[in-house]
Amino acid sequence: MGKRIYNILFHLHTVSGIVISAALYVIFFAGSFSFFRDEIVNWERDHTVQHPGEISLDLDATIDSLKLTHDLYGREISIAQVYNERRVNVNVGASADSLASEEAKKPEFFYLDTKSFDRQEYYSSYTLGEFLYRLHFFAQIPYPAGYYLSGFVAFFFLFALITGLIVHWDKIIKNFYLFRPWEKLKTVWTDAHTTLGLIGFPFQLVYAVTGAFFMLNLLLVAPSVYVLYDGDSDKLYDELGFKHPAFPLQYEKLEKEVSINKFISQTKTRWKSLNVSHVIIHNYGDKNMHVTVEGRADHSEKFLGVGEVSYHAETGDIVNLKDEINESSYLEGTKLALYQLHFADYGGLWIRIVSFVLGLVSCFVILSGVLIWLVARDRKDVPEKQKRFNQRVAWIYLAICLSMYPVTAFAFIVVKMFGIVGSANMYSLYFITWLLVTVFFVVKKSNSFTNRYSLISGSILGFLVPVANGIKTSNWPWITFVNQQYDILLVDLLWIGLSSCTLYAVYCMSSYKQTKVAA
Amino acid sequence: MPANKKHLTQSGWIRFSKITAGFLGGFFVTISFHLVFTIWFDQASVLITSAYSGFILWAVLMILAFLIKKAWKVWGIYMGLILVFSVVIYFGKMNPIF
């Protein structure tokens, strides 16, 4: 590689990296916890989920009780298990009947607990798990600014990944085994940045591309809509298979009793490995009532696979069938793969644990990059004013990023001890503590102080997370283990594991300092 | 060590021109390039492919914009590509057997 190309790419890597670094750190840190979003939510609520990925609800009984409060004729009722929580999403659409009452013309959405049958709405039942999940694509910043911001961070991350790989290309093998923690700080950061960056590269590439796709797909698709579909985006989403079949209302009451459960079990005999995650009842109580049952093949059986059947309710005839389980198409396979690769939900718990670790490794790569940037500019020929500016940037970046660890652990404890739910409470709890801790570290003006004390406080608070859970609910790890409440156990163990690692890191840093002093 | 400045674009205007050429030009080259394939292949399959290939191509085009020495050359090449792809798409849409 020529000197010119090397220097240009190096500069592009530095600039794109330093601009997105803090935002990218937040995305990776919150994103790593999002791998366990559902477990965290269940931990907060003290719930155990029996059949992950599947609606475990008697739908006939549910509809019967729904009838008591709603006029259901001509409406579309959708029941979906989106997350592995104890509750399902229930959506009752506006009645298609033009003569329906005003009440029936209003669409309604709520969550239904499958055990207590409580109805909940979104904002008042907002959890810390949901908060961290949404933080990883900046959903707390008003739509669409937050989505686009996170999307472009992902896109420029891709840019930084490619330039970084090319810059490092010639030294990939030679420097892979190079780690010189006893040299000056800059080589420590550089060795860690390049080696861990290379190990994490495939993982990070997948997340950069899929992340950009989730948040910026509209940008990519918009011009195509005009060229291919004459501006009709409905047609596009239809062709991409994002829509479910629709049926017109016949304006004739259906006399026959229809069992939704029967259609579900009928669908499950077609595909043995199917987990039914979504049921739609079209035109309820009408002669043209239909039932659509959708699900995914269990991941232990198949990597990709969705199945969907629509039945005519009165006759039981199958009117629409999508079988991607016996034979996958390129379109459906790609769509599903983009999601599954990002959510890491296809290979059991271990894939998620490995992804969690790689996510935190990425956090480390980001911060070591910032520190290389800082140290490389700490030279005699750099003007004093510029140096001070760089120093301040690093203080602020490190304070924002590293304080997330103790703040997150603290939020887990507070949420558990005081039973905090609701979006407003969660925002205040997390953002205010985060701001205070950040300001504290910025005022301290020392990167090593920020690093050391965020790790120590995070470790201590992290160890207290399972303690808080035990005190509050008596669900100590040994009890949840015996009772097979694995969601709750997992969150406790996650914190014990993470805290142990960071405490060990602090210990290593201390002994490193001592040898330095001794030398 | 930071990158050696002597190899970087010095003028602010030229740098701005390269950035916009890479970002906007690269974007439209990516879009038009993928649309060309809808003439021969299934539209939905091409679009879902662009979900991942699109972002990678766009990023690569942004990098290339900085590697080409002259900013006007970047603009020239990208505009030329967009023009060629657009003409192909236009005639492809008119005449499906094309």
Image (cartoon, coloured by chain):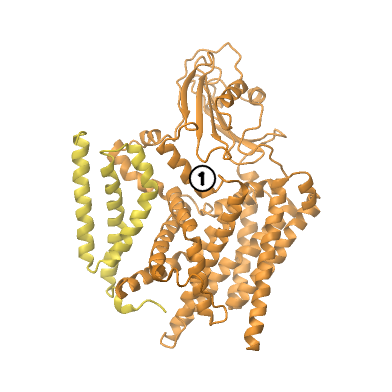
Chain colours: A orange, B yellow
SS assignment at label 1: helix
Closest to the observer: A215 or A466? A466
Q: Residue at the spot x=30%, y=38% of the render?
A: B41
Tell me: residue A513, above or below residue B37: below
Q: Residue at the spot x=76%, y=53% of the render?
A: A469
Q: For residue A513, what is the image quadrant? A: bottom right
Specify the subunit that label 1 lies on: A
Which quadrant of the rendered structure holds the N terminus of chain A? bottom left
Q: Position of residue A156 (x, y in %)?
A: 41, 60
Q: Position of residue A447 (x, y in %)?
A: 58, 76
Tell me: residue A251, above or below residue B41: above
Q: Position of residue A47 (x, y in %)?
A: 71, 43
Which quadrant of the rendered structure holds the C terminus of chain A? bottom right
Tell me: residue B63, above or below residue A135: below
Q: Badge 1 local density, few (<14 within 10 Å), some, or many (20+)? A: some
Q: Amino acid at mark 1?
A: Gln
Residue identifier under label 1 = A340
Relative horizontal placement of residue B32, taking residue A326 as reference (left or right): left
Please tell me how many numbered marks the rendered image carries.
1
Relative horizontal placement of residue A434, taking residue B46 as reference (left or right): right
Q: Position of residue B61 (x, y in %)?
A: 31, 58
Q: Residue at the spot x=53%, y=82% of the render?
A: A184
Mark yes or no: residue A72 visible: yes
Closest to the observer: A455 or A193? A193
Relative horizontal placement of residue B33, taking residue A473 as reference (left or right): left
Q: For residue A277, what is the image quadrant? A: top right
Tell me: residue A416, above or below residue A261: below
Closest to the observer: A336 or A169? A169
Mark yes or no: residue A131 visible: no
